[in-house]
Amino acid sequence: MTERPINDCFFTDKERMTHGEAIALLKSRLSPIASVSSVALSDALDRIAASPVAATFPVPLHTNAAVDGYAVRHEDIARGWLPVSQRIAAGDLSPQPLAPASAARIFTGAVMPADADTVAMQEDCEIDGNTVKLPPKLKRGANCRQAGEDVAPGDTVLHSGKRIGAADIAALTSIGSSSLKVFERLKVGILSTGAELREPQNGAPDLQMGEVYDVNRPLLHALLSNLPVDITDYGIIQDTSEDVAAALRLASSQCDIILTSGGASLGAEDHMLAALDDLGQRHMWQLAVKPGRPMMFGQIPKSSGGEAYFFGLPGNPVAAMVCFLMYAHPAIRRLAGEDWFEPMRFQVVAGFDMKARKPDRREFLRGRLSVQNGSTFATKYPRDGSGLISSLRESDGLIELSESGAAVTKGQLVDFIPFSAFR
Ligand code: AMP
Ligand code: MG
């Protein structure tokens, strides 16, 4: 690949980009970079389809009974008692055409005999020896599944760019697919920066004053676990410009996407911005978003040709998770071949008041859902602070507040994005 995926800098030199502008840029400028290969259907869960799959035959293949009961010609129901002329179970391949003025004993999934068009549930029938009387008000076509009613020949069962879920596996199996083309996994490199970060050792607390365990790498491993990526972990990088630059150089030579955390602001101990500007191209930095202001996005050319995409997440774990979910998660899915992913949002009743709010920035509060008198309420985690991992742990998702700065009054509707939307 010689051409740069994004070959003009779309970094707007505005002081801070809004959330909407950041999403619009990622959405309009990113496109799939993954190559294509075939996988067995049994390995296809959570992979992204790289070509459409269409049905070549109808599903179901034959019109069949939807219940256990009796199959008849609809007009024969008015005759009252009918002799039972044959018995057809699921798996009986070619039943005889239905004898005139008779009923066929039939079971769920069994092929309908030619000339029969209606099935009565056995519970609704009267039975006397080898004769049966069907309920007189049964509609024509009742309890029958028509050939092709699920999928018609030529129907597209899977679109290119769709992440393959459990239902897709079921649908592909129903049309006889056993392997398919998917996008290959992207290589994602992750690293944390910070001289204060330590790796936990066998559960024994061994922190010195001023140190914290590196939370963000395990967090990112977990957040990436369902995405079609292979992770390379570059560990903890010290706060020097040399170490940060060397880590980015190595990661960009080996990976399609780099996720870093920490060191993203302008402090003397923050080296990420300078390293990105030095090695590559910055497209985004400083968002009008809380938490997550120092979020960075850019690209770094590989010495072997091609580019690595770079996401510099804030260091605070809450901000790192919010920025990962809002920006990196959809971007990775798009680069990995998927159509643009928009997280599900729904409106819930605010179970809290929030008086003073700064305008001109989007806020993502951590919130918990509860149902009271049939309405869904979101309660805000009582303490702010983007270092409070408890705010994530105690929450079901993010309450999204607009840039208007308007106060929130208990009882009004607010937007809610559940964490479960990101899988
Ligand atoms: P920074 O963005 O590097 O200024 O870090 C902001 C805050 O987040 C500091 O309190 C850091 O100690 C903390 N922090 C940064 N990276 C991590 C990490 N990987 N795990 C836990 N806390 C972190
Ligand atoms: Mg730091």
Image: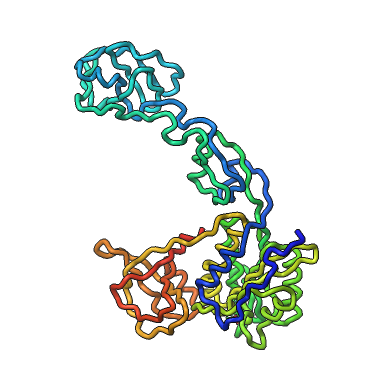
Quadrant assignment for the N terminus: bottom right
Q: Residue at x 66, y 76 (%)?
A: 193
The colouring scheme, among rainbow, by chain, secondary structure or one colour, is rainbow
Q: Give the x, y percent position of residue 423.
A: 51, 58
Q: Give the x, y percent position of residue 233.
A: 68, 65
Q: Residue at x 29, y 19 (%)?
A: 73
Q: Give the x, y percent position of residue 231.
A: 66, 61
Question: With 240 as the anchor, is 17 left or right in this view?
Answer: left
Which residue is the extreme one toward the bottom? 268
Image height of 264 relative to 30, above or below = below
Would you say residue 199 is visible in this rendering? no
Image height of 95 relative to 377, above or below = above
Q: Quadrant of ligand 2?
A: bottom right
Q: How many marks?
A: 0
Picture quadrant of residue 353: bottom left
Q: Nearer the viewer, residue 46 or 195?
A: 46
Image height of 51 relative to 199, above or below = above
Picture quadrant of residue 212: bottom right
Q: Residue at x 67, y 57 (%)?
A: 33
Which residue is the extreme one toward the front? 8
Picture quadrant of residue 120: top left
Would you say residue 145 is visible in this rendering? yes
Image height of 192 relative to 141, above or below = below
Q: Residue at x 23, y 13 (%)?
A: 129
Question: With 365 as the anchor, is 140 left or right in this view?
Answer: left
Question: With 246 as the anchor, is 163 left or right in this view?
Answer: left
